[in-house]
Amino acid sequence: MKESTIQQAQGARHAGILGVGSYRPSRVIPNADVVEAIDSSDEWIQQRSGIKQRRWATPEETVQVMSVAAARKALERAAVDPRQIDCVIVATVTHLIQTPAIATAIAYELGTDQAAAFDISAACAGFCHGIAMAADMVRGGSAGHVLVIGVERLSDLTDIGDRGTAFIFADGAGAAVVGPTDAPGIGPVVWGSDGEQFELIRQREDWRDVVASERPEMPHLVMQGNAVFRWASYSMAKIGQLALDRAGIGIDDLDVFVPHQANMRITDAMARAMKIPERVKIARDIAEQGNTSAASIPLALDRMIEEGDARSGDKALLIAFGAGLAYAAQVVIVP
């Protein structure tokens, strides 16, 4: 009997980020607008988080609208036609319709040629998860180009009276086009989860309980801030170092550090723990944008590129962490 084999798809030798885009909602919410409901002050919020203001979406700025706007910028900067996109990955926890995935509607509106499309739910780590999967798709041959989007409308799930979270969460979208490159542009991912700490960041109310209540209202996100701070500040420094090791570079080779924009104090603690050199540019987008979960890293990276803090060819370390507790980190070359 003749032996048959399954043919292997031919992928690119290397993959990298070809272009980045972002969308920031039009509503700017300064600390002064949130302090009364939580009996706080602008000074207290800035000391606790580094946040001066945040962006909240209008009703018209939906998850889909923000995603499409960010994606179009990324596609234009990558010089990639939407019809070249073979897969769309959307990282979000705030597309509040269980099914279908919002990625399918985004892929259609962008004009892709019936690209594969799906959502992933890894909270704040979602974008880095998406970048890892996209790189593997391009190298493995299952996609020529992949569009990765991180998008959130966290204001929909924010309890404005919760002193621990009301000033933290925000809205926005960021996107990246991943495709073939002449040299390695996305390093090996270091990812994982610590389900033992599942309760530290979570949706407070079960949807079934919300529907069954006499006065239904949107569920809210809650967070045990001190425990998250301790975990992220030190555990993530080790993950960041491991990502550098797997990429084959040292801390002195790094040009840009883009951690999830969770809290300025966490960013500073990680930088100290990793002994990041002073010359390395560090993303601090949270001061003006707030914490946008899955959108925070592409939003921060895009701002750094636009302001000249991240230049084409720079080596950037991305670290994301959040509910789950889920995390992911990789070194990328700035497009």
Image (cartoon, grey):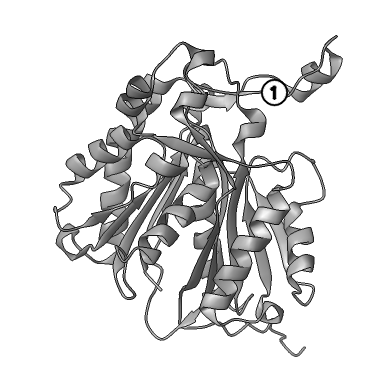
Direction from residue 41 to residue 216 in the image, left or right: right
The residue that appears at 68% across and 62% down in the rendered structure is 68
Q: Residue at x 47, y 30 (%)?
A: 168
Q: Quadrant of residue 229?
A: top left
Q: Where in the figure is residue 187, as x and y percent of width and height?
A: 38, 66
Determine the residue positioned at 34% across, 20% down.
Answer: 44
Residue 6: x %, y % from top left = 69, 81
Q: Is residue 60 above or below residue 254?
A: above
Q: Toward the viewer: 224 or 132?
A: 224
Q: Is 174 or 193 nearer to us in this picture? A: 174
Residue 195 image point, x, y percent: 51, 30
Near-viewer residue (115 or 133): 115
Check the picture and name the quadrant holding the N terminus. Answer: bottom right
Do we see residue 137 in this rendering?
no
How many numbered badges does the structure rendering display? 1
Image side of residue 103 versus residue 20, left or right: right
Where's the C terminus, which quadrant?
bottom left
Q: Secondary structure at mark 1?
A: loop
Above or below, 264 against 108 in this view is above
* Three-letter amino acid code at the position of disc 1: Pro
Tell me: residue 110, above or below residue 239: below
Q: Is residue 8 above or below residue 36?
A: below
Residue 230 figure quarter: top left
Residue at x-position 67% and y-position 69%: 87
- Image spot of residue 112 (x, y percent): 74, 74
- Determine whether, in the image, residue 59 is placed left or right of residue 190: right
Q: Is disc 1 surrounded by few (<14), some (14 to 19) or many (20+) residues within 10 Å?
A: some
Residue linked to disc 1 = 219
